[in-house]
Image (cartoon, rainbow, N blue to C red):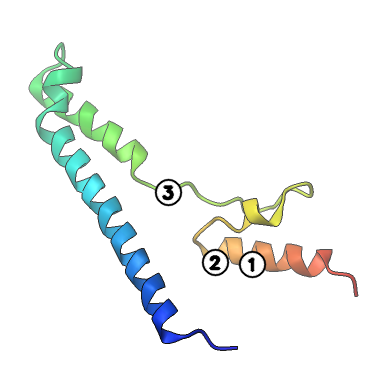
Amino acid sequence: MTTPTSSMRRVVLAAMVGTTIEWYDYFLYGTAAATVFNKLFFPGFSPTAGTLASLSTFAVGFPRPSPPTTPNRGASRRSISCGRSARSSSGTSATGSAARPR
Protein backbone atom coordinates (compact mmCIF):
# COMPACT_ATOMS: atom_id res chain seq x y z
CA MET A 1 0.00 0.00 0.00
CA THR A 2 1.47 3.34 -1.03
CA THR A 3 0.69 6.74 0.37
CA PRO A 4 -0.64 9.29 -2.12
CA THR A 5 1.76 12.15 -2.74
CA SER A 6 -0.78 14.80 -1.78
CA SER A 7 -1.24 13.37 1.72
CA MET A 8 2.54 12.97 2.08
CA ARG A 9 3.01 16.63 1.15
CA ARG A 10 0.39 17.57 3.71
CA VAL A 11 2.19 15.59 6.43
CA VAL A 12 5.57 17.11 5.54
CA LEU A 13 4.10 20.62 5.50
CA ALA A 14 2.39 20.12 8.87
CA ALA A 15 5.61 18.77 10.40
CA MET A 16 7.60 21.67 8.99
CA VAL A 17 5.14 24.28 10.29
CA GLY A 18 5.03 22.66 13.75
CA THR A 19 8.81 22.49 13.99
CA THR A 20 9.16 26.09 12.84
CA ILE A 21 6.71 27.32 15.48
CA GLU A 22 8.44 25.27 18.18
CA TRP A 23 11.92 26.59 17.34
CA TYR A 24 10.63 30.16 17.07
CA ASP A 25 9.17 29.75 20.56
CA TYR A 26 12.58 28.57 21.84
CA PHE A 27 14.25 31.52 20.11
CA LEU A 28 11.88 34.02 21.73
CA TYR A 29 12.25 32.46 25.19
CA GLY A 30 16.04 32.33 24.86
CA THR A 31 16.17 35.98 23.84
CA ALA A 32 13.92 36.99 26.72
CA ALA A 33 15.95 34.86 29.15
CA ALA A 34 19.16 36.58 28.08
CA THR A 35 17.86 40.16 28.09
CA VAL A 36 14.78 40.55 30.32
CA PHE A 37 14.35 37.67 32.78
CA ASN A 38 17.53 38.40 34.76
CA LYS A 39 16.20 41.82 35.78
CA LEU A 40 12.58 40.70 36.15
CA PHE A 41 12.93 37.46 38.12
CA PHE A 42 16.38 37.78 39.73
CA PRO A 43 16.70 41.44 40.81
CA GLY A 44 18.73 40.62 43.95
CA PHE A 45 21.50 38.91 41.98
CA SER A 46 24.42 40.57 40.26
CA PRO A 47 23.86 41.10 36.50
CA THR A 48 26.10 38.13 35.61
CA ALA A 49 24.54 35.79 38.17
CA GLY A 50 21.03 36.91 37.15
CA THR A 51 21.77 36.20 33.49
CA LEU A 52 23.21 32.78 34.34
CA ALA A 53 20.19 31.96 36.50
CA SER A 54 17.73 33.00 33.80
CA LEU A 55 19.63 31.07 31.12
CA SER A 56 19.70 28.02 33.38
CA THR A 57 15.88 28.05 33.43
CA PHE A 58 16.03 28.00 29.63
CA ALA A 59 18.55 25.13 29.68
CA VAL A 60 16.37 23.02 31.98
CA GLY A 61 13.39 23.23 29.63
CA PHE A 62 15.27 22.77 26.37
CA PRO A 63 16.22 19.06 26.23
CA ARG A 64 13.58 16.47 25.53
CA PRO A 65 12.96 13.80 28.14
CA SER A 66 14.82 10.58 27.46
CA PRO A 67 12.79 7.44 26.85
CA PRO A 68 12.92 4.54 29.28
CA THR A 69 15.57 1.98 28.39
CA THR A 70 13.91 -0.90 30.21
CA PRO A 71 10.16 -0.95 29.72
CA ASN A 72 7.89 -1.78 32.62
CA ARG A 73 5.88 -4.96 32.10
CA GLY A 74 2.62 -3.12 32.79
CA ALA A 75 3.40 -0.15 30.51
CA SER A 76 1.50 0.30 27.30
CA ARG A 77 3.34 0.27 23.99
CA ARG A 78 2.36 3.88 23.33
CA SER A 79 4.18 5.15 26.41
CA ILE A 80 7.27 3.17 25.47
CA SER A 81 7.39 4.32 21.84
CA CYS A 82 7.25 8.07 22.53
CA GLY A 83 11.05 8.46 22.55
CA ARG A 84 13.24 9.65 19.70
CA SER A 85 16.31 7.47 20.07
CA ALA A 86 17.20 4.04 18.77
CA ARG A 87 16.90 2.64 22.29
CA SER A 88 13.18 3.28 22.36
CA SER A 89 12.54 1.63 19.01
CA SER A 90 14.46 -1.49 20.05
CA GLY A 91 12.52 -1.60 23.31
CA THR A 92 9.26 -1.26 21.44
CA SER A 93 10.12 -3.99 18.97
CA ALA A 94 11.21 -6.31 21.77
CA THR A 95 7.99 -5.63 23.67
CA GLY A 96 5.90 -6.09 20.53
CA SER A 97 7.51 -9.39 19.63
CA ALA A 98 7.14 -10.68 23.19
CA ALA A 99 3.46 -9.73 23.32
CA ARG A 100 2.54 -11.42 20.03
CA PRO A 101 1.25 -14.98 20.21
CA ARG A 102 3.34 -17.40 18.18
Count the numbered circles shown.
3
Q: Which residue is mark 3?
A: 64
Picture residue at 40% right of the left edge, 82% below the top: 6
Residue 43: image location, x then y, percent: 14, 14
Sequence-first tag of 3 and 1: 3
Q: Nearer the viewer, residue 33 or 4?
A: 4
Type of the residue with mark 1? Ser
Q: Quadrant of the N terminus?
A: bottom right
Dot 1 alpha-carbon crowd within 10 angstroms: few under 14, some 14 to 19, many 20 or more: few
Q: Which residue appears farthest toward the bottom when viewing the image?
A: 1
Q: Quadrant of the C terminus?
A: bottom right
- Between marks 2 and 1, how big is the CA–CA gap? 6 Å
> Considering the numbered disc 1 on the image, is that residue within a helix, a strand or a loop?
helix
Dot 2 alpha-carbon crowd within 10 angstroms: few under 14, some 14 to 19, many 20 or more: few
In the rendering, which numbered label is found on residue 86?
Answer: 2
Type of the residue with mark 3? Arg
Residue 44: image location, x then y, percent: 15, 11
In the rendering, which numbered label is found on residue 90?
Answer: 1
In the rendering, which numbered label is found on residue 23?
Answer: none
Q: In this picture, is 91 found above or below 50? A: below
> Considering the numbered disc 3 on the image, is that residue within a helix, a strand or a loop?
loop
Q: Which residue appears farthest toward the right when viewing the image?
A: 102
Q: Splitting the image into 4 quarters, where does residue 61 fall?
A: top left
